[in-house]
Image: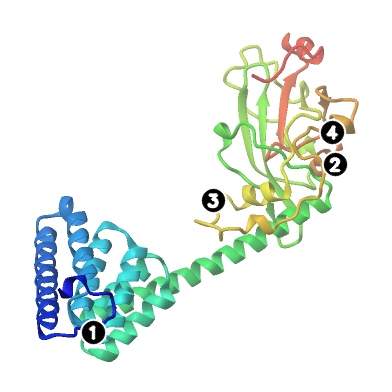
């Protein structure tokens, strides 16, 4: 019987030839039936898409149909994989369909669609163009090619934005590093949101500054404090009384500014760039921050080893510039400068100066 013949051997009798032809006919009929079942499963909706894939796979495995029919099977399975979001499988199936039949226009469209979904824009455009070489009037391919070109332009525009934002962030990071400033993890961002310094055309840094009234943990926010400005210009002589200052203790001549020495966690070079880029662009190329090198310092420690003042409240000399204070060895900038305001006229002042108060 031909059924038991070794693979690759030729039939030696008319009976064996007849057996082989019968087997081929059975396999062909099975493949055609499986193909039709797959088509029906697609019509039945998403719950049956996996059943459709199974039918097309079994039909393909029969290896009993013509090249053009095999092309249809692979293209059909690609269609279902597209519907399921299995874009890699859809692309592979579409490419197989094209190998079996180079004029299968649906295979070109589905290959382009899958590549486009994977953001393989060059490959997607190539499939569209090859399909249009077969059928120049195909509107679906023309429309998809326009979408691909639009996505490519958007990507190029985004890439230009990213490069510009990265260049600005690196310039800003270098400006801070050259000044000897130490940038740390942000604090009190629930009050300020994500704020960042700005480097102007003259190379001067402008900082947003948060003022916290330690006694009541109320706050004021200065949008733009130039690094060359001195602190005594921060307050106006004719400022309105604070709404919570019942005894008018917080007058211009009574208030003092402080920062807490050596507290905070330093950011690495990578973390500084991430912070400076946050909110400027939608996304940064994968692996970008891996290319950035750190200085090798112990980034997870505080700067207590730099100063004997660690944890102490340091009075700010208001005749100094903002830069003078920020570059002090015992000051870590918590993303943006934060200073605590107290009044010499307040009963809270002695408690604060004695170190009996700490931020909540």
- Residue placed under numbered mark 4 in the picture: 330
Q: Are circles 1 and 2 on residues that touch, CB within 8 Å?
A: no
Give the residue number, with chain letter if any, for mark 2: 324
Residue at figure coordinates x 27%, y 74% from the top left: 6
Horizontal side, residue 234 vs residue 297: left or right: left
Left or right of 221 in this view: 126: left
Q: Nearer the viewer, residue 204 or 64?
A: 64
Q: Position of residue 155 (x, y in %)?
A: 47, 69
User: Which circle's residue, 3 or 2, is located before the other in the chain?
Assistant: 3
**Where residue 46 sits: x, y (%)?**
17, 53
Which residue position is annotated with label 1? 10
- Which of marks 1 and 4 precedes in the sequence? 1
- Report the number of numbered marks: 4
Q: Which residue is mark 3?
A: 279
User: For the residue labelled by badge 3, is the local secondary structure a helix, a strand or a loop?
Assistant: loop
Where is residue 240? Give x, y as percent: 62, 27
Does residue 212 sit above or below 87 in this rendering? above
């Amino acid at each position: 019987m031909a059924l038991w013949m070794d693979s690759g051997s030729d039939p030696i009798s008319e009976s064996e030839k007849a057996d082989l032809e019968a087997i081929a006919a059975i396999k062909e009929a099975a493949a055609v039936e499986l193909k039709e079942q797959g088509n029906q499963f697609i019509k039945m909706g998403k719950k049956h898409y996996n059943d459709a894939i199974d039918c097309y796979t079994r039909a393909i495995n029969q290896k009993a149909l013509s090249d053009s029919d095999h092309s249809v099977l692979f293209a059909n399975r690609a269609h279902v994989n597209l519907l399921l979001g299995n874009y890699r499988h859809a692309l592979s199936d579409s490419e197989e369909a094209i190998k079996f039949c180079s004029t299968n226009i649906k295979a070109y469209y589905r290959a382009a669609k899958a590549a486009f979904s994977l953001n393989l824009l060059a490959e997607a455009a190539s499939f569209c163009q090859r399909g249009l070489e077969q059928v120049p009037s195909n509107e679906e391919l023309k429309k998809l090619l326009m979408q691909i070109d639009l996505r490519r332009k958007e990507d190029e525009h985004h890439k230009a934005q990213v490069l510009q934002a990265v260049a600005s962030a690196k310039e800003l990071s270098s400006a801070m590093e050259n000044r000897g400033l130490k940038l740390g993890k942000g604090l009190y961002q629930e009050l300020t949101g994500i704020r960042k310094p700005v480097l102007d055309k003259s190379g001067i840094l402008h900082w947003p500054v948060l003022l916290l009234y330690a006694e009541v943990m109320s706050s004021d926010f200065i949008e733009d404090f130039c690094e060359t400005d001195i602190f005594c210009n921060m307050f106006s002589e004719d400022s309105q009384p604070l709404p919570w200052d019942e005894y008018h203790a917080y007058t211009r001549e009574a208030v003092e500014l402080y920062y807490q020495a050596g507290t905070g966690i330093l950011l690495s070079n990578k973390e500084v760039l991430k912070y400076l880029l946050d909110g400027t662009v939608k996304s940064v190329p994968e692996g970008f921050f891996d290319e950035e090198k750190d200085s090798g310092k112990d980034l997870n420690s505080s700067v207590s080893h730099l100063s004997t003042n660690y944890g102490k409240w340091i009075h700010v000399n208001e005749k100094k510039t903002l830069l003078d204070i920020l570059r002090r060895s015992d000051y870590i900038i918590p993303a943006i400068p934060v200073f605590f305001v107290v009044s010499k006229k307040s009963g809270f002042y002695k408690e604060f100066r004695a170190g009996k108060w700490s931020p909540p």
